[in-house]
Image (cartoon, coloured by chain):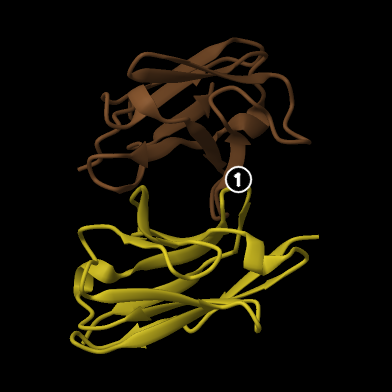
Chain colours: A brown, B yellow
Amino acid sequence: QSVLTQPPSASGTPGQRVTIACSGSNSNIGSNIVNWYQQLPGTAPKLLIYNNNQRPSGVPDRFSGSKSGTSASLAISGLQSEDEADYYCATWDGSLNGHVFGTGTKVTVL
Amino acid sequence: EVQLLESGGGLVQPGGSLRLSCAASGFTFGTYDMSWVRQAPGKGLEWVASIGWSGVNKHYADSVKGQFTISRDNSKNTLYLQMNSLRAEDTAVYYCAKHWADWGQGTLVTVSS
């Protein structure tokens, strides 16, 4: 069982805004930076957001990240069909002395 | 261009061993921390182990501690994962990752009799 909890699914119509929450604790999100990954079907994960809210080069500005206390969130605005994928949050956990991934959220474009 | 190419996966019987390799190119391998992450069929991502740039600092998930060993050879630009006493629950695609922007395509490990 992961220490980072995400909703199993989220959905929206093209153009809508979708938000995915990632809930943790003081030992992980509360004291470390959060990354977000996108995993398209059958492919390796891709870094989408790093350091809570930074986008790597090439990631559209439709994707944004934020963190507050022991929770983080990923927002996708202007949802597109190619955004259908699994999304994972991740951070370091000081109590476990290791990296942790969220449970994952499957985004469906209706 | 960063490239990470995993190899060494395959079918192994319960109790067996495998050594995974990850050949790196396109960056100065010896200056980056590296990790192994696995994904069981139909499941989420699970961090397995990490190693610091020098090879001194290592961290393991509780689920593999004492069973798996991460190592690296900076002269060969290669990351390794030695997996012993394999169990069915170790069946997964294993990815190597350069913290954390770049990932390999993964290698499948199947533990079955």
Provide residue A20's location: percent of width, then percent of height: 44, 20
Q: Amino acid at mark 1?
A: Lys
Mark 1 belongs to chain: A
User: Of residues A20 and B1, which is closer to you in this image?
Assistant: B1
Image quadrant occupied by the N terminus of chain B: bottom right
Above/below status of A79 relative to B71:
above
Image quadrant occupied by the C terminus of chain B: bottom left
Quadrant in the rendering for residue A54: top right
Above/below status of A99 relative to B66:
above
Look at 48% across and 70% down and name the residue there.
Answer: B55
Left or right, residue A109 beside residue B93: right
Left or right, residue B68 beside residue A107: left
Quadrant in the rendering for residue B83: bottom left
Left or right, residue B68 beside residue B113: right
User: Of residues A96 and B90, which is closer to you in this image?
Assistant: A96
Residue, far right: B1
Residue identifier under label 1: A46
Quadrant in the rendering for residue B37: bottom left
User: Of residues A2 and A83, which is closer to you in this image?
Assistant: A2
Provide residue B97's location: percent of width, then percent of height: 55, 58
User: Of residues B27 and B22, which is closer to you in this image?
Assistant: B27
Look at 66% across and 33% down and name the residue there.
Answer: A82
